[in-house]
Image (cartoon, rainbow, N blue to C red):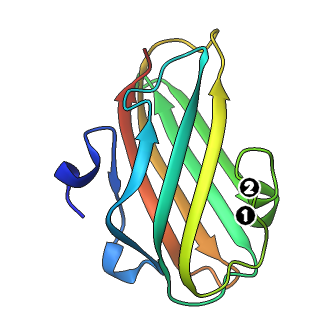
Amino acid sequence: MTNEDHGDIWSLCGSPDSHMLKGYQGSVSITPPIPRTGEDINVQIGGHLLSDVTGGKASINLTLMNMIKIKRDLDLCTILASDVVKSSCPLNAGDIILNAKAYIPKDIPKLPLKGDIKITDQHGHPVTCIHLDFTLH
């Protein structure tokens, strides 16, 4: 996938050829296209998962305005089971569609945000890696 496929606010990072989740052309949608405070952001990803994912983690490494750093490691199954994603472990190999919906609070500063969200499986293998680069409106 190239940046033209999914706009300017995100791209794949790391080595996409090594990712276990192979996104289909045009199968990722983010609405609204420019995230806004006080609104929901909806993300849908469709693709082919090469092997079962029974656990793992999501590593969040973000920077607001090149000053405020956010680093967290979260349990992947907990995230999947949350109100944000509403899915569950295991994720079975094959065709998959993941939907996530989250509210962006109004009191978050409207600043440039950059960074990576890396998802790894129970063995530490990369499922996917997303690089974000946008300013909240």
Residue 73 at x, y = what percent?
70, 55
Dot label at residue 119: none
Tell which of 69 and 135 is nearer to you.
135
Dot label at residue 74: 2
Q: Residue at x 62, y 48 (%)?
A: 100
Instruction: Identify which amino acid the numbered label 1 is placed on.
Output: Leu
Residue 7 at x, y = what percent?
26, 42
SS of the residue under disc 2: strand
Residue 9 at x, y = what percent?
33, 38
Location of residue 113 (image quadrant): top left
**Residue that mark 1 sits on:** 76
Relative horizontal placement of residue 83, taking residue 25 as reference (left or right): right
Disc 1 crowd rating (10 Å Cα; few below 14, some 14-19, many 20+) is many
Instruction: Identify which amino acid the numbered label 2 is placed on.
Output: Leu
Measure the C-alpha gap from mark 2 to mark 1.
Answer: 6 Å
Location of residue 12 (image quadrant): bottom left
Relative horizontal placement of residue 2, taking residue 57 as reference (left or right): left
Q: Say above or below: 76 vs 117.
A: below
Q: Residue at x 46, y 26 (%)?
A: 35
The answer to the question of whether label 2 and label 1 lie on touching residues, with beta carbons closer than 8 A, is yes
Q: Say above or below: 7 vs 14.
A: above
Q: Residue at x 36, y 67 (%)?
A: 14
SS of the residue under disc 1: helix
